[in-house]
Amino acid sequence: MRYLTAGESHGSQLTAIIEGVPAGLMLSIEKINQELARRQGGYGRGGRMKIEQDQVEITSGVRHGKTLGSPITMTVKNKDWKNWQTVMSISPVSEKEASLRRVAKPRPGHADLVGGMKYQHRDLRNVLERSSARETTMRVAIGALAKQLLSSLAIEVAGHVAVLGGIKAKIPPKLSVAAIKEKTAISAVNMVDLTVEDQVKTLIDTTKKVGDTLGGIVEVRVENVPAGLGSYVQWDKKLDGKLAQAMLSINAFKGVEFGIGFEAASLLGSEVMDEIIWNKKGYQRKSNHLGGFEGGMTNGEPLIIRGVMKPIPTLYKPLMSVNIDTKEPYKASVERSDITAVPAASVVAEHVIATTIAMELLDYFPADNMQELKKAVENHRKMIRSF
Ligand code: EPS
């Protein structure tokens, strides 16, 4: 399975083409739309989310509710486009019109300046339109399809916010995917610890008042992934490496860890490794400090993957930068931004992880139809259990 996304933040629409999905997967558009709505939510979002109500349209690869095995095209319309038709016009416009909403003042921490230098765009809007996190809409749409494929193999995925603006959610050590879904469904900030919710909301409110933004840490858990996905035999076959890349491909993400992650640096080896036991279900681990990975392979324990998101760089509070026309210093300022998008990013993370696992499964068990895939996964599970 492979995919591409396309689309500008204020262009007419976002598009994804996904190839390699086996035929015969029952695909619920309603479920995709529910995930898109989850991504749009979260306390601390800005004005744009009041305009958009993301709804997917599928224009190929699906018939009568089932995948055909042919490329699947998904689109989501940008409602805001009606306000940007001249600025984002595909056809040439007058010089005066072309200068409307021109961006000449790069925001520190954004792709603006380097993107401009690299692609030789004197209007930095040409950079920000594609580097915008609006693109994550399609990653969620693709991931929502991937989650339906994984679900049919009894593999479940959920994401939540572990830390927002320095406030940590208390996370039970054996937090299940079902518990994450249940708890976050009633949380305005996608946290499993409802006791800190008010504190987080107050922090978002006070941060908004001073024109600043907040980052955080998101966590994704995946249950029932068969042991043995990924491999130790070559650097680019390690699945934890692929998942790290997927996590870091989300806008504003700066780091990844598995299980206890960076905490392992200050513990002894005997405190970190997960002891092996055997029972009727096969091999198990007494703990899951390593987050379900050994030697770049899944070991059958739940996957625990965390990613850190920097605070959004579009700030109301001025930071120093340089005007690319005059080369004069100036104080950056903007009209519209999110205060935090960490709750949304936890939904995005859940979906990019689901997509990467689905891609890995389809690499490992190549299949043209769902029956073939289910059988191959079932056989693999039997083989692992009887080792
Ligand atoms: C974004 C800036 C804001 C966010 C946007 C990402 O958009 P605008 O510039 O239109 O106010 O709302 O996020 C989305 C549109 C979205 O769907 O998540 C940015 O610069 O990255």
Image: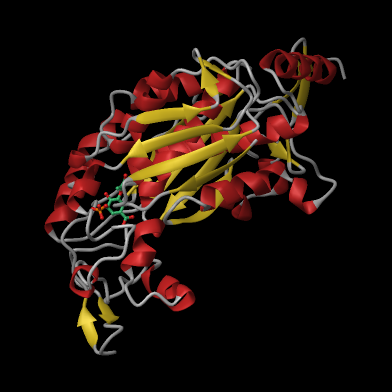
- Tell me where residue 16 appears, x and y as whole percent: 48, 40
Q: Is residue 261 visible?
A: no
Q: In the rendered image, which quarter contains the C terminus?
A: top right
Residue sitting at the far top? 280
Q: Residue, x 31% and y 65% (percent of image)?
A: 92
Snapshot colouring:
secondary structure
Q: In the rendered image, which quarter contains the N terminus?
A: top right
Q: In the picture provided, is 386 more to the left or to the right than 371?
A: right
In the rendered image of this protein, does residue 69 appear above or below residue 12?
Answer: above
In the rendered image of this protein, does residue 130 appear above or below residue 135?
Answer: below
- For residue 184, which quarter of the picture? top left
- Tell me where residue 57 appears, x and y as whole percent: 39, 29
Q: Nearer the viewer, residue 26 or 147?
A: 26
Q: Nearer the viewer, residue 200 or 380?
A: 380
- For residue 111, which quarter of the picture? bottom left
Q: Nearer the viewer, residue 283 or 328?
A: 328
- For residue 163, which quarter of the picture? top left
Q: Nearer the viewer, residue 279 or 38?
A: 38
Q: Residue, x 34% and y 57% (percent of image)?
A: 90
Q: In the picture provided, is 297 more to the left or to the right than 184?
A: right
Q: Residue, x 23% and y 53% (percent of image)?
A: 85
Residue sitting at the far left? 209
Q: Is residue 235 visible?
A: yes
Q: Residue, x 59% and y 51% (percent of image)?
A: 245
- Tell me where residue 381 appears, x and y as whole percent: 77, 18
- Tell me where residue 316 appears, x and y as whole percent: 18, 64
Label total for image: 0
